[in-house]
Amino acid sequence: MKPEKFVRNISDSVINENLNVYKDLFETTAIDTVSDEYWKEALGLYNELDSFQKEVLFKIIRQTQVDSISNILGILDGRLYLEGQSSDFELTYDGKKLNNDLQDIFLEIDEESRE
């Protein structure tokens, strides 16, 4: 697998698929069927939003996902470091190194998807 394919798969799975799961959960879950307090609060808030505000909420969720993935890829690429990290990570697949430009590739893919 090439780095571009790896990053596209992450983007599709983590961002696109998960965002659709969130949308479906918020749109189809009845608050009276939920026992988890977090979800009750989240659904209560969501149900009070108008359609524009709901759209903005999902944009915020998406951007949070993008920022989180970008930071993780930056760590794998050696651009960001974890506390106590003393050497770089090496991400390999089938014996080939993937990381070096993963964060840049991801941000390019994300920018293309917004156009």
Image: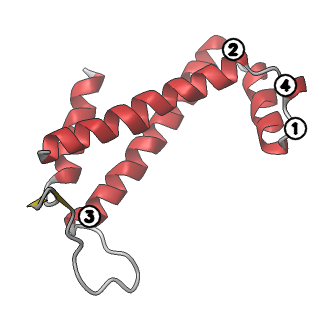
Work out whether 100 lies above or below 28. below
* Residue at screen point 69% across, 14% down: 50
Q: Secondary structure at mark 1?
A: loop
**Residue, x 32% and y 74% (percent of image)?**
81
- Residue type indicated by callout 3: Leu
Q: Measure how far apart labels 2 and 4 are at the Cα level.
A: 17 Å
- Give the residue number, with chain letter if any, for mark 4: 31
Q: Residues within 10 Å of mark 1 (few under 14, many from 20)?
A: few
Q: Amino acid at mark 1?
A: Ser
Pick the front one: 56 or 81: 81
Residue 89 appears in which quarter of the rendering?
bottom left
**Which residue lies under the disc numbered 1?**
35
Give the residue at mark 3.
76
Figure quadrant of residue 38: top right
Q: CA distance from mark 4 to mark 3?
A: 39 Å
- Looking at this view, is 42 or 49 the one in front? 42
Residue bearing the label numbered 2: 50
Q: Which numbered mark, 1 or 4, is in the foreground of this view?
A: 1
Q: Earlier in the sequence, mark 1 or mark 2?
A: 1
Tell me which numbered mark, 1 or 3, is placed earlier along the sequence: 1
Label 2 near label 1: C-beta < 8 Å? Answer: no
Left or right: where 2 falls relative to 78: left
- The 10 Å Cα crowd at callout 2, few under 14, some 14 to 19, many 20 or more, is few
Inter-mark Cα distance, 1 to 4? 9 Å
